[in-house]
């Protein structure tokens, strides 16, 4: 796996290369824009709020990784899963490096005939065995999960 990240500056000031906008080009041929929050006290350090922060993309990627696993595990178990969402909330350290210290994942899994035990098992398997992002972030963060099952 590979990714190239290029600093672009902000669109209005590309000649001076100010701003904190970055364009990531993934090995699979996709692009992702990242930016920083505006910083009134240090304008040279701040972004223009044009895209997600880099750490937001880490959190989003973790949610995508685990939701992917949960859906795949349920499908492989021949469960009729129709939708899956996961809301991640997090806390970060107050000093550098500001790693994630707590992450909570709340899953809402929709399907027909889905049992709570099947969903709980899929989440546990993702959390404990398959989701690289969750397992990696678990080295610095306490990760907790909750879920609800919606029948259709």
Image (cartoon, rainbow, N blue to C red):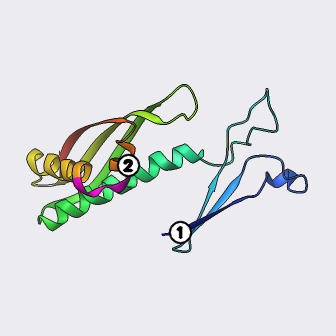
Residue at the disc numbered 2? 136
Tell me what residue is drawn at x 11 percent, y 64 percent. Answer: 77
Q: Is residue 90 left or right of residue 80?
A: right
Judge the density around disc 1: few (<14), some (14-19), many (≥20) Cα neighbours within 10 Å.
few
Tell me what residue is drawn at x 72 percent, y 51 percent. Answer: 21
On the image, the x and y values in percent for residue 141 come to: 38, 36
Q: Which residues are magenta?
A: 129-133
Q: Nearer the viewer, residue 107 or 54?
A: 54
Residue at the disc numbered 1? 2
When asked about the image quadrant of residue 29, the answer is: bottom right
What secondary structure is the stretch in magenta mostly built from? helix
Q: Nearer the viewer, residue 109 or 8?
A: 8
Q: Nearer the viewer, residue 46 or 75?
A: 46
Figure check: 143 above or below 75: above
On the image, the x and y values in percent for residue 92 come to: 48, 31
Question: What SS does tag 1 mark?
Answer: loop
On the image, the x and y values in percent for residue 32 come to: 59, 60
Question: What SS does tag 2 mark?
Answer: helix
């Amino acid at each position: 796996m590979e990714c190239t990240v290029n600093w672009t500056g902000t669109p209005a000031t590309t000649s001076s290369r100010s701003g904190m906008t970055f364009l990531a080009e993934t090995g699979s041929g996709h692009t992702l824009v990242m930016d920083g929050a505006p910083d009134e006290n240090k304008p040279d350090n701040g972004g223009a709020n044009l895209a997600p922060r880099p750490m937001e993309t880490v959190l989003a990627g973790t949610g995508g990784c685990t939701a992917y696993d949960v859906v795949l595990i349920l499908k492989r178990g021949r469960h009729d899963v129709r939708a899956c969402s996961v809301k991640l909330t997090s806390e970060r350290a107050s000093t550098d490096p500001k790693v994630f210290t707590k992450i909570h994942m709340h899953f809402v899994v929709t399907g027909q005939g889905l049992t709570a035990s099947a969903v709980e098992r899929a989440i546990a398997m993702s959390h404990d065995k398959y989701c690289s992002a969750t397992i990696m972030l678990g080295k610095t963060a306490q990760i907790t999960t909750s879920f609800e099952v919606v029948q259709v």
